[in-house]
Amino acid sequence: MSSPGQFSTPAVVYDAGADLGLGCGLPTQFAAITEGNVVLDLGSGAGNDVFVARSLVGDSGKVIGVDMTEAMIAQAQQNLAKLGYKNIEFRLGDIESLPVKDNEIDVVVSNCVLNLVPNKTKAFQEIYRVLKPGGHFCISDIVLRGELPEKLKSLAELYAGCVAGALQYDEYLHAIREAGFVDLEIHKDHQYIVPNATLAQYLNQEDIQIYRQSNAGVFSITASARKPSRTE
């Protein structure tokens, strides 16, 4: 199996009907998915990342999408029916209690969903449980650095961008390591810059200056880590 740090760019299938524009970074870019892998997409929505992953695993692999909403599962099933793939499943369930067997998955991916899960520690424990020994995850998510001003926490644009429920950066990485993962790697680390004109709707000029100087903010990260093999 390729390590999370090795990745290629084969042709992928993009289904516009399955892309709801709700992600914060396509994790499959760094996920080292190879032909024959069993892949799990957490918070699969209408199925776009599942279909991208399927183009990488080929006919010999399998992709499972899990989502907590019946409406999204139904939409994903409709999109799947159009494409006709036989090695894709969509399952209704929670990330904190995945409807997946132990040691079943080669690669877990997720696009801007875990930050919305109330118990991140449990979520990473579940990811660890379902991965095969030596398997890995690659997740794009939202984290915070520093404390946002109270008035800014109600900013609609931030909440629409998946900020609600986001952990501090260090807490997020701690939850990954505590679950037992090794070889943690950050592939992308991007700060969302809120324009001054938007900030001015919530903060006065002095507070804006203090906020800018604090280096606090909202960040999109893409992280990968590996479940140790049985020989480690």
Image (spheres, grey):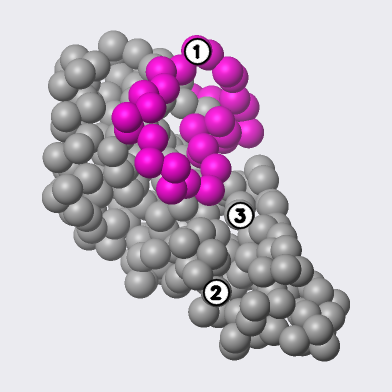
Identified at 57% across, 33% down, the residue is 30
Assign the magenta stretch its main secondary structure: loop
Q: Type of residue at label 2?
A: Leu
Q: Mark 3 points at which residue?
A: 220
Percent of width and height locating residue 147? 66, 82
Please report whichever mark, 2 or 1, sits nearer to the chain's N-terminal start.
1
Q: Is 30 on the left or on the right of 145, as rendered?
A: left
Could you tell me which secondary element the residue under label 1 belongs to?
A: loop
- Which stretch is magenta? 1-30
- Mark nearest the camera among 2 and 1 is 2
Nearer the observer, 159 or 1? 159
Q: Is residue 226 visible?
A: no
On residue 155, the disc is 2
Q: Is 91 on the left or on the right of 177, as rendered?
A: left
Please report whichever mark, 2 or 3, sits nearer to the chain's N-terminal start.
2
Q: Type of residue at label 3?
A: Ser
Nearer the observer, 221 or 224? 221
Task: Indicate whether 42 appears above or below 35.
Answer: below
Identified at 38% across, 27% down, the residue is 16
Identified at 35% across, 13% down, the residue is 58
- Magenta residue check for 11: yes
Q: Is residue 220 visible?
A: yes
Percent of width and height locating residue 139? 49, 47
Please report whichever mark, 1 or 3, sits nearer to the chain's N-terminal start.
1
Identified at 30% across, 19% down, the residue is 61
Task: Indicate whether 217 appears above or below 135.
Answer: below
Q: Mark 1 points at which residue?
A: 11
